[in-house]
Amino acid sequence: MTTVEQSVEVDVPVSVAYAQWTQFEEFPRFMGGVERIEQRTPTLTHWVAKVDGVRREFDAEITEQVPDERIAWTTVGGDLRQAGVVTFHRLDDERTKIMLQMDHDPRGFAEKAAEKLGLVRQQTKSDLTRFKAYIEGRGEPTGGWPGRV
């Protein structure tokens, strides 16, 4: 397993950043390589992604969700192994620090090479930077799920 840790500060309140992050079907708007996400149940999502030329479909289960604080997940079934947590930290009334920690197990030559070249870390940082631009440009979330898991 390899661990990736990245963070970004966004100029929106923590409730806005968190609410947007709960809109999983919007992730393709700011996550490179993510083609589609379907929210199948309150805790199960289905992902279609193409990373480093490899197309993957997998399910991810939300294992913990605390409003305005954290969302944790793990993949279920299939051959992709990944788990992570994203946390939201109030810096002041209008600024939030988002921290992402993800463990993943690169499979195959392309994924292992991408990991050795640091491409996974770069992609994660780019995704967070695009999320920052997306949510700051909107100023409000496209929706929100206040539930707790």
Image (spheres, rainbow, N blue to C red):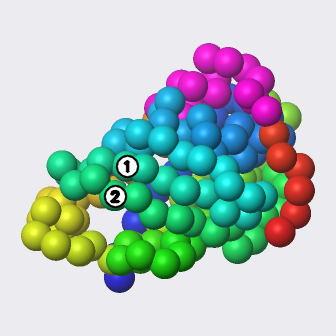
Q: Residue at (61%, 57%) from the top-left corner?
A: 45
Residue 135 magenta-drawn? yes
- Drawn side of residue 24 relative to residue 46, left or right: right
- Drawn side of residue 33 relative to residue 118, left or right: right
Please report contact status of discs 1 and 2: CB closer than 8 Å, yes or no.
yes
The secondary structure that most of the magenta stretch takes on is helix
Q: Which mark is residue 49?
A: 1
Residue 85 magenta-drawn? no
Pointer 2 residue? 56
Q: Please, what secondary structure does the residue beneath circle 1 have?
A: strand
In-front residue for pair 75/135? 75
The residue carrying pointer 2 sits among few (fewer than 14), some (14 to 19) or many (20 or more) residues within 10 Å by Cα, namely some
Magenta region: which residues? 130-143
- In percent of width and height, residue 76 lies at 53, 76
Q: Is residue 115 above or below residue 39?
A: below
How far apart are the alpha carbons under marks 1 and 2? 5 Å
- Drawn side of residue 93 relative to residue 126, left or right: right
- In percent of width and height, residue 102 lies at 48, 67
Q: Quadrant of the N terminus?
A: bottom left
Query: N-terminal of the two: label 1 or label 2?
Result: 1
Tag 2: amino acid: Arg
In-front residue for pair 119/11? 119
Q: Residue at (45%, 72%) from the top-left corner?
A: 82
- In percent of width and height, residue 103 lies at 44, 74
Tag 1: amino acid: Ala
Can residue 17 be seen in the rendering of this structure?
Answer: no
